[in-house]
Image (spheres, helix red, strand yellow):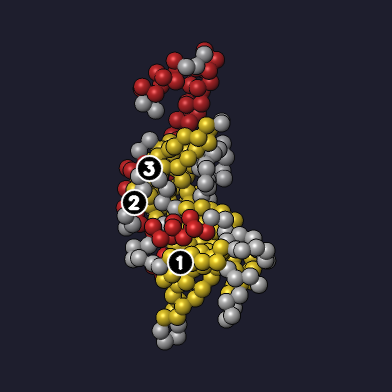
Amino acid sequence: MGPELIVLALGTLGLGGIGGWWVTQQARRDHVNRARTDWVRAGQIIRYGPVSAVCYGQRPRRVYRGGMFGALGIAGGQVVFDGLRASRCDLHLAPDTIRWIGLSTIPVLAGRAISRRRVLSIHTDGPDGWRVIVFALDEPLAFAEQVAGITDLPVRDSGGTREDYGPVTAMRLDQDVYGEWSPDREDALYLAPDRLLFGWRDAIPLDDVRRIDTLHQRGGGPFSQDILRVEYVISGEFEEEFAVVGFGVRGANQWAAAIQRRIDAPVPVQAGRKKKS
């Protein structure tokens, strides 16, 4: 924390508040120093840090809250986070699981107010599915560049927005040869920077998307929400083949627009109505 912020904080706290603030800051400094000592004793080579950071979890959210303080660094060739009072965010990220390194701005709920924070987002793909670990720290770009150094991935800056979209709950739909839709199952729908994910595991690379349709419901049916229809290519035995999947999701038009913005080549986006059964 810089000297200007310390003066401001002390000016707004009473004597009891000042004492509590100093105790908290000392506990955090001690934790970071202890993490460094533990890593060295474990024989890990420290490339960077550890530094103070707040982790906002390992799944993306529309609005973030409840960050966990800890020590963040690169040790033993991995990105490491060691929480102070909770272990929900503790992690060791191997470089080959990291898919995206980004700087973005997220909404954070504190009390009744929502503020916007500049953060580092690391997207990973591993045995437990797709994860998005979000860190707030003093110098996110410096740490991002260190992560880039062990992964050979670029650091991407989304400016004042997020690099992703969602997640929301959606119903995956199968389409038969007659064009009729039937429900499959309900799970999380999430648009990562380079892929559309359902259930955090089933992915459609955005480079494979060839067409997007939004079908608006006219009335009743097995599901009440509009349909986001995605046509994409898959590898066939001898040549590329096309596959189609649908998602019953609120705001299908917004999802189509979000996918379109993230695809380099223009993709047709069509809107229509689902015929009555």
Residue 136 in percent (x, y) is at 43, 39
Give the number of the disc on residue 160. 3
Q: Are marks 3 and 2 in contact (CB under 8 Å)?
A: no
Side (left or right) of 51 relative to 222: left
Separation of marks 1 and 3 at Cα, in angstroms: 29 Å
Q: Earlier in the sequence, mark 2 or mark 1?
A: 2
Q: Quadrant of the N terminus?
A: top left
Q: Earlier in the sequence, mark 1 or mark 3?
A: 3
Q: Secondary structure at mark 1?
A: strand
From this view, report whether residue 13 is shown above or below residue 104. above
Residue 145 in percent (x, y) is at 32, 48
From this view, report whether residue 184 is shown above or below residue 60. below
Q: Are marks 1 and 3 in contact (CB under 8 Å)?
A: no
Q: Tag 3: residue type? A: Gly
| Nearer mark to the viewer, of 3 and 2 | 3
Q: Tag 2: residue type? A: Arg
Pick whichever, 271 or 46, lies toward us: 271
Q: Tag 1: residue type? A: Gln
Q: Are marks 2 and 1 in contact (CB under 8 Å)?
A: no
Give the number of the disc on residue 156. 2
Side (left or right) of 230 relative to 101: right
User: Which residue is labeled 1 in the image?
Assistant: 270
Residue that extends furthest to the bottom in the rendered view of this protein: 238
Q: Is residue 152 visible?
A: yes
Q: Secondary structure at mark 2?
A: strand
Residue at (45% x, 42% y) in the render: 106
